[in-house]
Structure formats: C-alpha cells, structure tokens
Amino acid sequence: MTTNGSSPLLLHAGPAAGFDEPFEMLAACHERVARMLRLLARLREHLERHAADGQAADAQAADAARDVMRYFDQAAPRHHEDEERHVLPRLRASADAAHRELAARLAADHVEMAAAWAALRPDLVAVAERRWPGGGEAEAAQAFTRWQRFAALYERHAAAEDEVAFPFAASLVEGEARAAMGREMAARRGVG
C-alpha cells in the first residue's frame, strides 16, 4: 500500500477533453493509453514480486488486470476507429508522400496491435481469475515479453500520431467539420 492508503497498482484518470474538441479527445485517449500501459508494467512488477514468494495473483492484481482489459477491449478499439475515420483519410489524401506512408504504417499498426492484444489478453484473464502463474517461470517470462511488445507498439504508434498525424489532420478540420467529427465520435459511443 502507498502512504495515502491507495493501492500501488491503481492509477487515477485526469480530466478529459470532450467531443466538442475531437482532436484534443484523441490526444487525451493517448494519455489514458499511457496510464494503462503503466498499470500493465506495475502489474508485471507486482506479479514478479509475488511469484518470487510462490504466491498466485492476488485480488489487487486481479483488479488491475480487469482494468487493463476493460480499457483495451472497449475504449482502444473505438479510438482506433476514430483514427481510421478522421485522421488516416486526411493523411492518405495529402500531397506529401511522407503523410501517405505514415497513414499506411498507422493502419498496419492497428492490425498489429489488435493481434498483440489478442495474444496477451489470455494472460490477463488468468490474472483476473487468480490463476496466475499457470505455467511457471518460463510461461510467465513469455507473457511478460508479450506485454512489453504490446506496450512498445502502442508507445511508438501514439508518438507518431501525437507528433505528426493529429496536428496535420487537425490543421485541415475546422468549424462545422470539426463539430461534425465530434458528434460522429459521440454518436458511435451512444453519447448525446
């Protein structure tokens, strides 16, 4: 436990942008992704400490695993769809070949990240069900390699979007088009 009595695995969300600021919302999603990836790293450290003592996943680890799964099962796919609908088409339509290449790479990243998530999700299910570790040290090491790969993919992807893709797309979408983008994003989530 930390000194304030909260769980060392819990990370608290900060304020988020609203649908009236769609590009800011996309960037805020990256902040939430980063928090979830930090939670995943802290979960790994927690599991490694407890496994060294011969213990299975505890309730704290199970809660953290469920939080990570909830985010990457629900919010992350919606965020990728936002990018596919509102950012990548603008990059693809650019006269700049570097933008078009970036669009292709980001779309490929979405496929790769989905596959990486599918590969590591069963690890988190095992933690959530307190069946961790299931296959011993070697299997845990393989799982942690999957977790690191997943985090590295997301970090590289988000950096390219934050640095190039989002600013470029945002420069092309103003006024009513930006408002319509926000409304479409909200409607797909059943908001408003």
Image: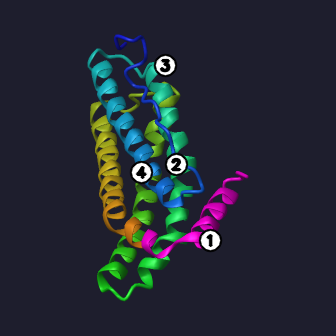
**Residue 186 inside the magenta-drawn segment:** yes
N-terminal-most mark, 3 or 1 = 3
**Residue 1 inside the magenta-drawn segment:** no
Say few, some or many: other residues with alpha carbon within 10 Å of mark 2 (under 14 / 14 to 19 / 20 or more): some
Structural distance between the alpha carbons of marks 1 and 4: 25 Å
Residue under the image location 32 percent in, 16 percent down: 54
N-terminal-most mark, 3 or 4 = 4
Q: Which residue is mark 1?
A: 176
Check disc 1 and give the amino acid type: Glu
Q: Which residue is mark 4?
A: 30
N-terminal-most mark, 4 or 2 = 2
Horizontal side of residue 84 vs 113, given as left or right: right
Helix, strand or loop under label 2: loop
Residue under the image location 33 percent in, 68 percent down: 164
N-terminal-most mark, 1 or 2 = 2
Magenta stretch, residue numbers: 169-192
Q: Position of residue 158 (x, y in %)?
A: 36, 57
Helix, strand or loop under label 3: helix
N-terminal-most mark, 1 or 4 = 4
Relative to 59, residue 104 above or below: below
Residue 17 is tagged as 2
**In front: label 1 or label 2:** 1
Decide which of 191, 150 is in the foreground and name it. 191
Q: Position of residue 37 (x, y in %)?
A: 37, 42
Q: Main secondary structure of the magenta part?
A: helix
**In front: label 3 or label 4:** 4
**In front: label 1 or label 4:** 1
Q: Position of residue 113 (x, y in %)?
A: 41, 58
Badge 1 vs badge 4, beta-carbon distance below 8 Å: no
Q: Position of residue 55 (x, y in %)?
A: 36, 16
